[in-house]
Amino acid sequence: MMIPLIILDRDGVINQDSEEYIKSPEEWRPIPGSLAAIARFTAHNIPVAIATNQSGLARGLYTEKTLDAIHQKMCTLVEKLGGKIEYIAYCPHGPDDQCACRKPKPGLIQACLSQWSLPAAEVPVIGDSYRDIEAAMAAGCYPILVKTGNGLKTLQKHPELHEKIPVFDNLAAVADYLCPEST
């Protein structure tokens, strides 16, 4: 299977999520195996993009400068493992702002797709929440759910997802599936 791009949610897929929001680089902690998974996608020549809601900006919990520092930490840690995050799209709006980018709307995913001019149907979108899955489907992409972050809660609320889309324990398990080691 040739994968032209992988789009990842950030909080709960790459790093530990928090109901209090990730407000500083110090609070950003990777989920074990997630950074190595991104490096593995890179090693298989699959570009990695991130589509993340960041309503903490609209709520005044952190600034764009702080968000940039969080993303720089994430990218630096990925690069130390030989990986690369090619593009980050984020929604700075709150839930009531009626924007076109906040997931479950497809705007962030479409922004990622437009960087490569790719057909959506060939692109997996990996998330931990139902809104990630809805955004992937609205954009015409291939949704994948991970059980990290809010993934288990998502499966409890929407048990039908097991029948409809691939579900994996974590991002490392997705990398094992999409990028099998040659034997």
Image (tube, rainbow, N blue to C red):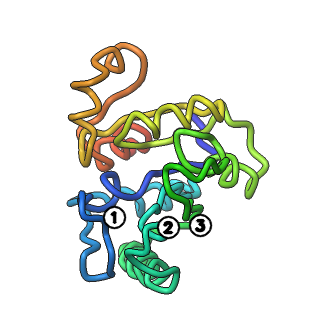
Structural distance between the alpha carbons of marks 3 and 2: 25 Å
- Residues 163 and 60: in front is 60
Name the residue at 53% across, 49% down: 96
Amino acid type at image mark 1: Leu
- Residues 73 and 3: in front is 73
Structural distance between the alpha carbons of marks 1 and 3: 14 Å
Q: Indicate the position of residue 33 as horizontal and vertical percent values.
A: 25, 58
Q: Indicate the position of residue 16 as horizontal and vertical percent values.
A: 24, 60
Amino acid type at image mark 3: Glu
Name the residue at 50% across, 61% down: 42
User: Sequence-wise, which precedes: disc 3 or disc 2?
Assistant: 2
- Give the residue pinned by disc 2: 58
- Give the residue pinned by disc 3: 86
Name the residue at 24% across, 64% down: 20
Task: Mark 2: give few (<14), some (14-19) or many (20+) Cα within 10 Å.
Answer: some
> Where on the picture, by quarter, is residue 30?
bottom left
Name the residue at 35% across, 57% down: 11
Task: Mark 3: give few (<14), some (14-19) or many (20+) Cα within 10 Å.
Answer: some
- Give the residue pinned by disc 1: 35
Task: Mark 1: give few (<14), some (14-19) or many (20+) Cα within 10 Å.
Answer: many
Where does the N terminus fall, quadrant-wise? top right
> In the displayed structure, would residue 131 be above or below residue 11?
above
Q: Indicate the position of residue 88 as horizontal and vertical percent values.
A: 57, 65
Q: Secondary structure at mark 2?
A: loop
Q: Indicate the position of residue 39 as horizontal and vertical percent values.
A: 41, 63
User: Sequence-wise, which precedes: disc 2 or disc 1?
Assistant: 1
> Where on the picture, by quarter, is residue 82?
bottom left
Front position among marks 2 and 1: 2
> In the displayed structure, would residue 73 be above or below residue 11?
below
